[in-house]
Image: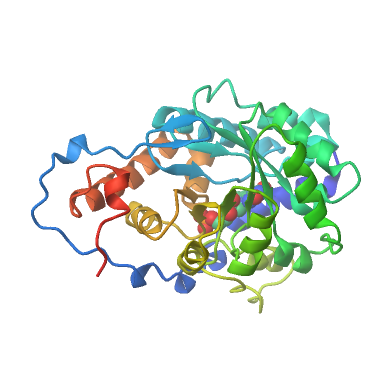
Amino acid sequence: MPEAIETRKLDHLVIAAKESVQRPALSTFDSVRFEPYALPDLNMDDISCSCDFLSHRLSLPLIISSMSGGIAQADRMNIHLAEAAEAKGVALSLGSMRIALEDHGQAKSFQLRRYAPNVPIIANLGAAQLRSKGGVDDALRCIELAEADALYIHLNPIQEAVQQGGDRDWRGIIDALAQLNAVSPSPILVKEVGHGIGPSTAKAIAALGIKWLDVAGSGGTSWAQIEHERINENESIFADWGIDTVTAITKISNLGLPLSLIASGGIRNGLQVAKCLRIGASLAGIAKPLLTPALSSTDDVIDTLKKFEEELRTTMFCTNSACLDDLVRAPLL
Ligand SMILES: Cc1cc2nc3c(=O)[nH]c(=O)nc-3n(C[C@H](O)[C@H](O)[C@H](O)COP(=O)(O)O)c2cc1C
């Protein structure tokens, strides 16, 4: 295996757990406030948080956002995430599968279908790999390899730009995305990695016929800061680069594009999940809150997902929402 990728992935796991790479001050969740409804005509335990996603019925409108894979430390972590996804009925997305394409021995890290037979699994590859020679075939191979229901292509220009040895040549990325979307038998979803997707990018993606966009906004894990901390001790001037999750979802929703939106980036509780659904997202994704639990055990991941569920359910109870269709119509202040 190329030593550089293994070292980088390990650094990412360690540095992503540090508080200095979290940017909560950027998030604008406080600007969204539900009108409280003090006469809920509901049994809180009967509230349904379920929704459809990629031809599956989920129990919760949640995606475990892409994290790692392809290094020994991530193998167990991915099994814990997969088992928890199955137990709680949420979708599972995989970390970048570039490493499995370059070293076939690492594919097992991403072969999690037997741990999560009944929930959507989303494979993952970077835009920079997609645009390189053979990239479209590689992307299709990732779907097969993971027995996935769909594929995330992640867009991370700021991360690549500040990373030592990062991919600086992105010419042809739009054509490659269009080509992939035209030939893929499975849905193609596009995501950022924590610096957000704004309205102009969303328009370009919708024009390609892509139907799913995960804004992965700023306000949570900052990849510019993670790359910076691999070689420096101070703060990167790009640590706060991007568009925050609430602003991205609001602005893109207002465009009325034929895109279903996934909110992620800085989502740290179930109230924030509810807010994202209320302003236009179909589902919410979480990465960092599951990182430490995933390194520990399946039960720890399940406990974290249960906490999100309870907070979402509480918000639904106090807005008189019996189901997610009610929640998206709940009045805001
Ligand atoms: C340890 C770690 C590894 C990640 N690796 C990937 C990756 O391989 N591919 C990807 O698309 N996103 C990756 N991400 C980004 C997340 O999927 C997510 O978009 C981002 O962390 C923002 O969500 P958060 O604020 O909940 O962490 C990673 C995140 C973490 C914390």
> Is 12 or 67 nearer to us in this picture?
67
Which residue of the protein is positioned furthest toward the right in this rendering?
133
Q: Is residue 17 visible?
A: no
Q: Image check: 327 left or right of 221? A: left
Q: Could you tell me which residue is drawn at 71 percent across and 49 percent down? A: 9
Quadrant placement of the N terminus: top right
Q: How does the figure colour the protein chain or chains? A: rainbow
What x and y, as percent, mark residue 189?
Answer: 63, 46
Tell me where residue 154 appears, x and y as whole percent. Answer: 68, 52
**Where residue 330 appears, x then y in whole percent?**
25, 57
Quarter of the image that includes the C terminus? bottom left
Q: How many marks?
A: 0
- Percent across and percent down for residue 54 are 53, 34
Task: Tell me the residue at 27%/65% (across/down).
Answer: 332
Looking at the image, residue 253 sits to the left or right of residue 324; the answer is: right
Q: Residue furthest bottom?
A: 237
Q: Residue at x 28, y 67 (%)?
A: 33
Q: Is residue 206 above or below residue 224?
A: above
Of residues 198 and 105, the one nearer the viewer is 198
The quadrant holding residue 224 is bottom right
Residue at (34% x, 51% y) in the render: 270
Q: Is residue 220 visible?
A: yes
Q: Which is more toward the observer, 34 or 280?
A: 280
Image position of 249 with respect to 68: above or below: below
Residue 149 left/right relative to 5: left
